[in-house]
Amino acid sequence: MGPTLARRSLLRTSLAGAALLGLGNLAGCGGAQGGAGAPTGDEPAALPEYLRYDGVKPDFPGQAGRLTDAYANYPAEPVRMYDEAPGDGRPLTGLSYFNGSLRPDLGQNLYWQAMNAALGSDLEITVVPAAEYASKFATVTAGNTLPDMFTILPTLPAIPQLLQATAVDLTPYLGGDKISAYPSLANIPTASWQGCVFGGRIRALPIERGLQTTKLMYLRRDLADSLGVDAEVADFDDFKSLCAELTAPGANRWALANLPLDYLRAMLKVAGPWALDGDTIVSTWTRPEQLEALEAARTLFAAGYLNPDVLAAPPSQSTEWFHSGAAALKWDTYSGWTGFYLYSTVEGFAVSGLPVPGFDGGKGQPVLGAPNIAVAAISAAAEDRIETILKLADWLAAPFGTQEYLLNKYGQEGVHHKIKDGNPVLLDEHKGEFGLGHIYLSGSPSVFYYPGSAEISREPQEHQRRMLPDAVADPTVGLYSETGSRNLAGILATVQSLEADIVGGRRPVSDWSAEIDGLVKGNLQQIQDEYNQGYEQAR
């Protein structure tokens, strides 16, 4: 939304495997009762009651966990949630991260100044490049200088123990109906709060993305229509035929912008790395359907339906190919749907989402993304002003359609945005001022919003309505593996390299089983055991 759209791919490469930990794309969420290997409290936390905010009515209402709210226009008269600034005049210190250009200093940053005035407490947030965050966090914790609020990433070691030692137990302040004192935080669905319980207690605030992290196969509908291509897909053979019709190397166009392996896995019902077998979490990498998915992806690559540079290109390149029309299909998250339109300069640009059929017909099985993209904690040293900090967090989590959200995401009218046809449009001059780091300390639930177009705003919700009834949740979301936090990067690099080699024809499909067996005998089995320990505790 607004300036945050460009940040949706933060850490895509370095932390892309966080879902293997059940922690979302960017940050670690503790086990539902503390995670594997984590000490538990005497009594499990009462999760915050979900109290949907009804001060703003969506144009197309969603349903928590099933459909994302959608808006065609920003309300003409935004609701004000806070009649006065929530701060106490003292700074709110924080530690967070950024990708992109560094923000201007406070004296030259009109957005920062406006936020400070609205909050009644100055934001003093240390932001560091994402790749350096773990090192910076280690230095801060070693020096016992944690700020009031701090973001948690999955690469940090011993997350449950860390938060039990350093973070405020929020259960007495937010558990059950106590959260009603903070209506914006109460507007965050329960699924996100489940990922913020460590050692049986609420130790963090969710940075919610809901269903936006779930992936789908995008189609450049305008390209397909211009070619007269029927984009109906009922099985893998239909998908293969679609790829053939969309590919024209002579016109510098290939069907696929990135590897379709996870889409094929969804057709075969092995889309996520983990699944439930009864009441036991198991790795899907050992399933025989993996070989079928790899063989199918290999066939598509050998037929020339993927851009020949796809195996070596950075993730950002696939987006450029998709925007330019050099590719017509792209595997990406729901968060990208309206963003594709916002950043496209192509006349008549249009996207749609393919269904997930079964490989041989019938229905496939998508996997839901993690509900949180990050979590943030409040330092135990700041508990003397916990109510003020929670009010500040509540202000920062004000939902779409409020005055607070408008300032938070779009800045000041006439300075950072203008109103066009009733909707805020960012101005170029001050776009670089937004990177304060606060969006990973507290935030509102995501929505679909494309200014002025009911059709574009509603399209992704309608796709969710068709696709998500068949989706399953990753059973590791909300669980924690200490072994995984130490070894995930190496495991993921091994698997991704193996996938690329097999799909690209450099290694046979049969190599998959031997490599995965080696990982199971190494750390993968221990990670699985720790997940099952946490899962049993949660039950």
Image (tube, rainbow, N blue to C red):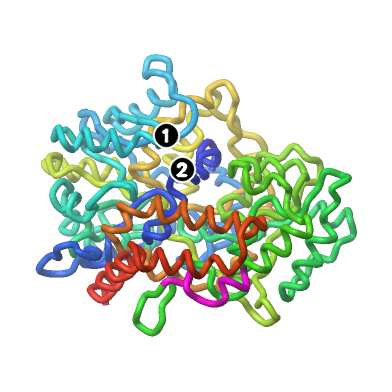
Q: Residue at x 54, y 77 (%)?
A: 288
**Relative to the observer, which residue lies in front, 327 or 176?**
327
Residue 468 x, y percent position in the rendering: 56, 71
Instruction: Tell which of 12 and 41 is nearer to you.
Output: 12
Residue 288 among those drawn in magenta: yes
Sequence-wise, which precedes: disc 1 or disc 2?
Answer: 2
* Residue 183 in view, yes or no: no
Say what amino acid the circle numbered 1 marks.
Phe
Question: Vertical placement of 418 versus 284: above or below?
Answer: above
In reply to whether residue 61 is colored magenta, the answer given is no
Residue topped by disc 2: 11
Kind of residue at disc 2? Leu
Residue 473 sits above or below residue 328 on the image = below
Identify the residue position indicated by label 1 in the image: 98
Alpha carbon separation for disc pair 1 and 2? 9 Å
Query: Can you say which quadrant of the picture contains the N terminus?
Result: top right
Q: Position of residue 467 (x, y in %)?
A: 61, 70
Left or right position of 429 against 110? right
